[in-house]
Image (cartoon, rainbow, N blue to C red):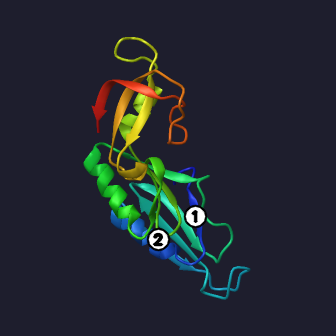
């Protein structure tokens, strides 16, 4: 058993959410659905369900137990992708019935936030030197209104002080020094 398991509280659709997620990711499945047989503060007997499922080999638990606190951006799941085709596949699948947000974020139809990003993004963000050995920073360039997950990553040299449109990604305007397409 894994040491830490994410636990998601849904107002009424935990079982549907788990099945939806399991249909998208490899090595994923719903493993057990348990309806609480007795009354609880969240509802009558049988209305509260505990759903155990696996996504990409990682165990999760979800519960249908009525409204408490809605999901928000304070917690999101990052999907690391090897190439643009994988970004597009997960983006399109998770976006079905949901809403696109800026900088590779989306909110699925159940209200959960996801970040669909290329694996190389975090590698490049951790890099402190550009191709010429000078300190570098990274800018994420998005197309189609800064929401769609079609983008290129660019290793950049600072040239100004204009703020980026993407939260948490750079604070200046930059001149590309080495384009990199995902």
How crowded is the residue under tag 2: few (<14 C-alpha within 10 Å), some, or many (20+)? Answer: some
Query: Looking at the image, which residue is at 45% across and 75% down?
Result: 16
> Does the residue at mark 2 contact the one at mark 1 (Cβ under 8 Å)?
yes
How crowded is the residue under tag 1: few (<14 C-alpha within 10 Å), some, or many (20+)? Answer: some
Instruction: Tell me the residue that label 1 is attached to.
Output: 8
The number of callouts visible is 2
- Cα distance between the residues tagged 2 and 1: 10 Å
Residue 27 visible in the snapshot: no
Residue 181 visible in the snapshot: yes
Which mark is on residue 108? Answer: none
Work out whether residue 73 or residue 100 is closer to the camera in this orientation and state it.
Answer: 100
Check disc 2 and report its element: helix, strand or loop.
helix
Residue 53 in the image: state x and y as whole percent.
46, 65
Query: Looking at the image, which residue is at 48% across and 58% down?
Result: 59
Left or right: 140 as drawn, with respect to 60? left
Residue 128 in the image: state x and y as whole percent.
46, 20
Q: Residue furthest left?
A: 85
Query: Looking at the image, which residue is at 45% across and 69% down?
Result: 18
């Amino acid at each position: 058993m894994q040491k830490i398991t994410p636990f998601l509280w849904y107002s009424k659709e935990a079982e549907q959410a788990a099945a939806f997620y399991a249909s998208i990711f490899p090595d994923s499945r719903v493993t057990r659905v348990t309806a609480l047989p007795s009354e609880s503060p969240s509802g009558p007997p049988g209305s509260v369900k505990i759903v155990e499922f696996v996504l990409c080999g990682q165990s999760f638990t979800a519960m249908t137990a009525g409204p408490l606190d809605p999901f928000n951006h304070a917690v999101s799941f990052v999907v690391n992708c090897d190439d643009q085709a994988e970004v597009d596949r997960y983006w399109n699948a998770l976006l079905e019935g949901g809403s696109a947000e800026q900088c590779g974020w989306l909110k699925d139809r159940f209200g959960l936030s996801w970040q669909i990003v290329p694996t190389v993004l975090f590698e490049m963000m951790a890099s402190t030197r550009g191709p010429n050995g000078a300190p570098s920073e990274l800018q994420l360039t998005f197309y189609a209104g800064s929401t769609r997950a079609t983008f290129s990553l660019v290793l950049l040299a600072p040239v100004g002080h204009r703020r980026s449109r993407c939260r948490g990604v750079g604070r200046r305007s930059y001149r590309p020094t080495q384009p990199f397409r995902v």
